[in-house]
Image (cartoon, rainbow, N blue to C red):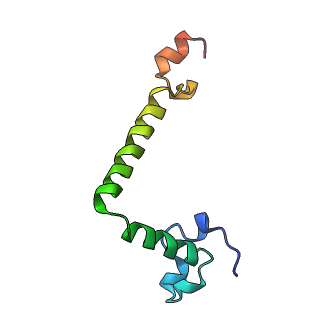
Amino acid sequence: MTERNCAEVCQNGCIEAANGTPEKCPHYESMLQARASVENTPFDRLMELAEEGAAESRLRGIGATPKFEDLPEDLRRSLGG
């Protein structure tokens, strides 16, 4: 199996699929399993999962502490930064 940094190499799409050989992708079996799982899941359940994920993401963002550099410049100055 070919070792590659997929986050770098394949960021614009699967290199092997572009070459016409998607089965050579190191993640091909995982992709097939994921595709089958999605295809076999009822649409209503997929929507429930999406809503749950969106709610979790929003809740995680509510409690997030802002980074100092993300604060407005005048507020950073008033805080001594």
The foreground one among 35 and 45 is 45
What residue is at 51 percent from the left and 73 percent from the top? 33
Residue situated in front as seen by the camera: 15 or 45? 45
In x, y percent, where is residue 42?
A: 32, 63
Residue most extreme to the bottom? 20
Quarter holding residue 28: bottom right
Residue sticking out furthest to the left: 44
- Number of callouts in the render? 0
| Front residue of this view, candidates 62 and 39 | 39
Q: Residue at x 60, y 85 (%)?
A: 24
Residue at horizontal 44 percent and vertical 28 percent from the top: 62
Q: Does residue 54 appear to the left or right of 31 in the view shown?
A: left
Q: In this view, does 69 lie above or below 80?
A: below
Q: Position of residue 43 (x, y in %)?
A: 29, 61
The spot of residue 61 in percent (x, y) is 46, 32
Q: Position of residue 1 (x, y in %)?
A: 70, 82
Give the side of residue 69 with respect to residue 1, left or right.
left
Q: In this view, does 36 lie above or below 57?
A: below
Does 18 sit above or below residue 37?
Answer: below
Check the picture and name the quadrant holding the C terminus. top right
